[in-house]
Each structure stands twice: as structure tokens, then as C-alpha cells.
Image (cartoon, grey):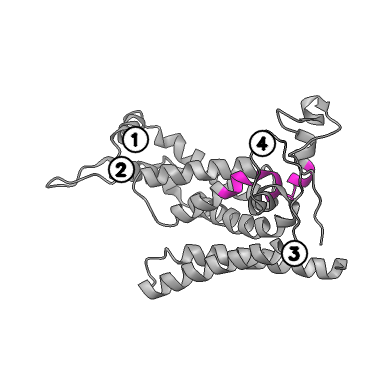
Amino acid sequence: MNAQNLNYKVVGVALASFVGGWLLTRGTDYELSASQQILALVGGLALFVAAVLFLYRDYEKPVNTAPDEIGEPGLARFLFSSTRSAPIWLGARLFLGWAWLDAGRHKLENDAWMKGGAALKGYWTGAVTVPEGGGSPRAPWAAYRELIQFMLDREWYTWFAKLIVFGEILIGLGLIVGALTGVAAFFGATLNMSFLLAGTVSTNPILLFTAIFMILGWRVAGWIGLDRFLLPKLGAPWTGGKFLGREDQERPGVHATTLKA
């Protein structure tokens, strides 16, 4: 396959995965009817599956498993180790990054978040408040509820609100440009989990699910992005790297493969 066809292939698959991610979040939109939600969820999942199968059909799994190791399924190796899957990660990464950047941007423009943290105070208060007449509070896990109350009593919302705002923006930017993608996805997943524990569902399950997969694919998720240059320089605790003061000749696990047609 020539370079022009490869470019079309990369763009097409990246676009399909981006639209697939958008459709999955639309499937959680409360304003849509049940049938529309189901169609969005099925359509989004179908686009992701189609993108994976389209690229996977030409993938040949390397045979290099040691005798004392359990073999890795070809599909898992393709998604999490081979840069051939990079276009899929690009689309999902752009979708996830925009979701975080947009959320942070809206909060940045809201004085209730940026001046005094009144919005976060109200959110935390609602999470720990027991409804009148009994029933469970919005945050049902007692340990997490106590943590929120601890932060409320000390008025941590005054600075924690800004931390959330700029954290969401940095997560979004990191994912969009593909810089330390696995780290950005990890912190995004942490925020998703904290919102879920506080009783907010919304799109958090979809974003959390996507972030978990992106953490698993940290080696190749940012290949079409800055990680293609950052990770070999930074290295990892088991591989070395120029920025860590050492560089191994062989760095298995950090973009050891190349994107091919």
C-alpha cells in the first residue's frame, strides 16, 4: 500500500473511532429517547469494532513469547503494543481529550468555580446531604462521604475547585496532543471515578471505560502525537531514556514497532 492510501486509511479509521466515541456519549444523553440512546450506543460500538477489524486484518502477530510466559492474544497485542493500531487510539484520544477540555473550559468561564469555589461547595454538599424523610444520600459509600465532609469542613473547595478546572484542561490538552497519554488518561479516570462515587453518572462510565483502555495502550495511544518522541526520550523505569540519564540500545515496550501499511 502506497503512502497516499496509508494516509487515507489512517484518517478514515481515526475519524470512525472519534465519531464512535461521540455516539457512545450521546447514548447517555438524558434528553434523547430510549430508542435514540440505544441506536447511539450500538452505532458507536459498531464503528469502534469496524475500525479495529479493518486494521487488524493485515496484522501478523510476532512470535517471540518466552517458554515460561503465557502467550498474549493477537488482538490484545495489536491494540496495546503495535503502532498499527495508532489511528484507532488517535480518534478515541481526540474525543476523550475534547470532552475534558470542554468541561474544563466551561468551568473556567464560571465564577462559581473560579472565585471561591461555590459551585464545588454546592456539589459536595449535595453529595453528603441525607434526603428529608430518610433514604440514601447521593454519595452512598460512607467512607467517601466522610472524605467529602472532611474537605467541606475545612473549606478546601476554595482551592480544590481551581485544581479540578485546570486539571481537566491539562488532561484534555495532554490527550489531544498525545503527550504522556497514559498519565493524562489515568488522571482523567481518577476524576471520573470521583464523580461516580459522588453520585454523578452522566457520561462518566463511558469516559472511564475509554480511559482504562487508553491506560493499557499507553505505549501506542500517543504514537500519532508527541509521545512518539517523548516516550523514547523519557524511557521507563525498566528501559531507560536520555531524560533519565541513561539510554539502552534496546527499549522493548516503548514504541519498538513502526506504523506500517
Report which quarter residue 145 is drawn in. Answer: top left
Nearest-to-viewer mark from 1 and 4: 4
Q: Which residue type carries mark 1?
A: Tyr
**Most frequent secondary structure within the magenta stretch:** helix
> Does the residue at mark 1 contact the one at mark 2 (Cβ under 8 Å)?
yes
Residue that mark 2 sits on: 139
Residue at the image position 64 percent from the left and 62 percent from the top? 52
Point out residue 45 in the picture as x, y percentages from the top left corner: 53, 65
Residue that mark 1 sits on: 144
- The residue furthest left is 133
Looking at the picture, tell me which residue is in the foreground, 257 or 205.
Answer: 257
Residue that mark 3 sits on: 10
Residue at the image position 28 percent from the left and 46 percent from the top? 138
Q: Which residue type carries mark 2?
A: Ala
Per the model, the C-alpha gap separating discs 4 and 3 is 33 Å
Q: Which residue type carries mark 3?
A: Val
Looking at the picture, tell me which residue is in the foreground, 31 or 40.
Answer: 40
Per the model, the C-alpha gap separating discs 3 and 1 is 43 Å
| Quadrant assignment for the N terminus | bottom right
Nearest-to-viewer mark from 3 and 2: 3
Point out residue 124 in the picture as x, y percentages from the top left corner: 34, 41
